[in-house]
Image (cartoon, grey):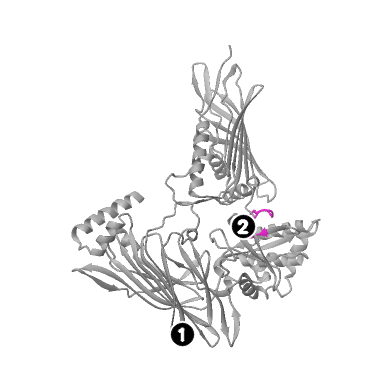
Amino acid sequence: MKYKKQLVSVALLVSFLGQAQISPIFEEYKEKYPNAYSVKLLEERKVDIGLKNGEILITQEITEENLYLDAAATYQSKESINYSTFFEVESIEAASMVYKDGKYNEIEVKDFVTKDEMNQSFYDDSKSINFIYPNLQPGSKSKLRYKEKIKNPRFLGSFYFADFHPTVQSKLTISVDKDISLKFKEFNTDGVNIDFSESEKHGKRIYSWEANGIDEFKLDPGAPNFRNTLPHLVPMITDYQLKGEKVKLLGEVSDLYGWYYSLVKDINKEAADNELVKIVNILTKDKKTNLEKVKAIYYWVQENIKYIAFEYALGGFIPREANDIFNKKYGDCKDNSSILQEMLEIAGLQGNLTWIGTRSIPYKYEEVPTPAVDNHMILSYIEGENVYYLDATGRYIPIDLPTPFIQGKEALISLGEKEFVVKEVPVVDSKKNTMVDSTFIKIKDHTVIGSGNFKLSGYFKTDFFSTFERNKKETKLKEVYTKELRKGSNKFLIEDFKETNKYDYDKDFIVTYTFNIQDYINQLDDEVYINLNLNRELSQFKLKEDRKSAKEYRYKSYVKNITVLEVPEGKEIAYIPDDFSIDNDFFECSIKYLKKENAIIYELIMDQDFILLDVEQQKAFNTLIKNVEKNFKEVIILKDKK
């Protein structure tokens, strides 16, 4: 389908070029960027920050101008501007510029449609202004200018100097009253020529950044979030003078924490619901240790409070009351943390509200002490030197594992009104996320028949449980297992299976199963050839050689595959491949063969000790994979006994 669309686009472009007038600017940029579908001619933001009657007032004007280089212009005619409680759009102008008779003629956008943005099954206060640029075609330009008011000075926002198409000019200007202090943090700007200037005019300090002629950025599939790649600037208002006194805003982590704490300090002041108290007492009745009590409560919240993301204004930062969450049985991340904290308090235990950014946000708290640094709330439970990161938005997450999308991230843990600590969530060791598949096989004619024992722990297990949530019928499950346990060839078929510890939080999940693989055996005269590399998960890790982006993985993993082949009666072993092993700083793989009585035991071990590979590491990894794949082709040879 994608290929057909490309052919249609090419045909439309050829037709257009054959009959339309070509503007000089179109010719210039079509030649310069032959593979680009559009060019950003201008991205400009002018920010004015003032102080009036002790209140910081912020307005900004955004101007965008784009040039469209191919027939995809039609598909890019839809545009929208998002806003919410914190951002109020005051005015908007938009127009298409169509080249005709040697000049660009303006076609004004007249219809603007405002609509609520639905987030899953709830509406929040986010809205969008939607419109369509009329008559866009190759060579057309679009112009957009709008003004908005930033109603909370903590949400000043980031400015990106580049995008996923070429950018001719990007410019940020911030004019600020002298009584207001700012600081700036740049990201990914090495190698990007950005001109910076600072001046004073009419009693204001004026900061200006300008970049010109930046090529498009590209992200390969599986790359980290664009914030890790695109050059951008994060401005922050640190403090301001009011009646001769300095008022701090966001200069340090303590300033951000002070604001966060002010939003949560008054939650759950009313008495806990009697039914909630009863549940806590039942859950903790027979538990011998505090950690066992925490675990029982944590697992109950995961199972009984449905996660639904929704917010309204500061509701995006303030958890709801535990009693309300308990009665409704749903909530977002803050709400789940709220009820979890209340239940621990009922049990005489202390849980600590914790702010954290997911892995899509690359900032540290010291770098960007603003609300841009995090987007998630969990609860931390501290016992001695151990910190347990309780994220009840997950399902089947055991107490000793964080959710995978916060691994390696900094957590801002509340310890009281003035006390907090920043801790780094550990990246879970590969051997906690294990997949062990042990099979015993026999040869019958050209078919392999066997039985297996499949064992999962850690994130492997929770991923499988999520799959089961979508496929609860047994007929569907057999299809799932046939797909997930597939080995040898696409003729692999599960005959029967039995599940143990399904949906258990703390025990390994085990599947015992029987299977057959038809037409897997090759035979020539009296010799039988069989490849014991039945599982080849490693091949899926292979990356394209022309990747330009880092590659991100959800978690580290440890895989062990064991296959025991019973040598058929009347046959003897003619050839067994040599053992093999390979490793570097972040990956290990070994293959071993062992002859034991009338059986051959094959063992494959892979230890993936990374969640991120840069481009150079990807090249090294691909080299390792190719070496392993050569050994995947090795076969056992059996022959008739003499």
Quadrant into which the C terminus falls = top right
What is the number of callouts on the image?
2
Is 390 magenta? The answer is yes
Q: At 40% across and 59% down in the image, what residue appears?
A: 164
Residue 394 numbered mark, or none: 2
Residue 540 visible in this rendered orientation of the protein:
no
Main SS type for the magenta part?
A: loop
Residue 414 position by quadrant: bottom right
Give x and y (percent) for residue 253: 62, 70
Where does the image place residue 17, in percent across and percent down from the top left? 22, 58
In the foreground, 517 or 600: 600
Residue 154 in the magenta stretch? The answer is: no
Q: Where are the magenta residues, as a range?
A: 389-403
Q: Is residue 327 left or right of residue 14?
A: right
Residue position for label 1: 203
**Which mark is on residue 27?**
none
Q: Amino acid at mark 2?
A: Gly
Above or below, 22 against 558 in this view is below
- The spot of residue 51 in percent (x, y) is 51, 84
Q: Quadrant of residue 604?
A: top right
Q: Which is closer to the viewer, label 1 or label 2?
A: 1
Label 2 Cα neighbours within 10 Å, binned few <14 / some 14-19 / many ≥20: some
Kindly identify the amino acid type of the residue bearing the numbered disc 1: Gly
- Observer-nearest residue: 420 or 82? 420
Cβ atoms under marks 1 and 2 closer than 8 Å: no
Is the residue 402 above or below the residue 605 in the image? below
Residue that protrudes farthest toward the top in the picture: 642
